[in-house]
Image: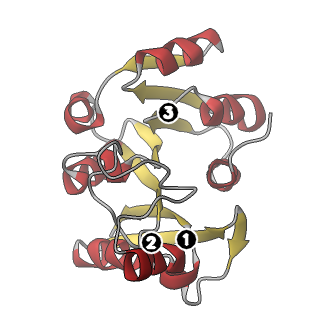
Amino acid sequence: MTLRPDLAIIAANVAPGSRVLDVGCGDGALMAALRDERGCDARGLELSADDVAAAVGRGLSVIQGDADTDLADYPDASFDYAILSQTLQTTRRPDWVLDQLLRIGQRAVVSFPNFAHWRVRASLLWGGRMPVTRLLPLEWYATPNIHHVTIDDFRAFVKSRGIVVEGAWFLSRDRRTSSAAANFLAEHAVFQLRRG
């Protein structure tokens, strides 16, 4: 099974044998890869009952839950990695969720679509409407994304909280791109973080 490009980056950067919590794990594709290819003890938390059923059907340990409320139930430092892929922008309190990830895991890995990508900017500038793109595919009234974030917003946010960026990867058209002008050129970002 081929992983989505951001998930492949995450999987390649999780140490073999780690304890992993995948928050917003979807159907468990990343968890299965971490279990099968990296020997990780992967657990998941997912809001969608259908995705929970699909992940459990793969033999994965996934419970139904909400990142906005249920992360508080996990003990401190109970995982090596707490992962949040393409979910940060859907949470009600992304700042609280990120704090919880860094409390639960020794490291947090976060990926999100970049709202400052040039196509998004052009759509707003020339069309005057909220953009619909490959990574932001739904109209404004139907999207689960409630906190659009840019790469520069996220960098400033983690810096203001003293969070250390251990790694950052950027994607455009599903291929890795350089960090130079990433806020303008990258469609998607992946950050690996730890407390300072």
The residue pinned by badge 1 equals 168
In the image, what residue type sits under mark 2? Val
Can you give x and y, in whole percent of width and height, for residue 101 in the image? 33, 47
- Label 1, label 2: how many angstroms apart (C-alpha)? 7 Å
CB within 8 Å, label 1 to label 2: yes
Tell me which residue sits at (70%, 53%) in the image: 12
The residue pinned by badge 3 equals 25
Horizontally, residue 128 falls left or right of residue 165, namely left
On screen, residue 144 above or below 28:
below
Can you give x and y, in whole percent of width and height, for residue 89 in the image? 34, 53
Q: Nearer the viewer, residue 138 or 100?
A: 138
In the image, what residue type sits under mark 1? Ala
| Residue 165 circle label | 2
Tell me which residue sits at (64%, 68%) in the image: 171
Tell me which residue sits at (23%, 77%) in the image: 160
- Label 3, label 1: how many angstroms apart (C-alpha)? 20 Å
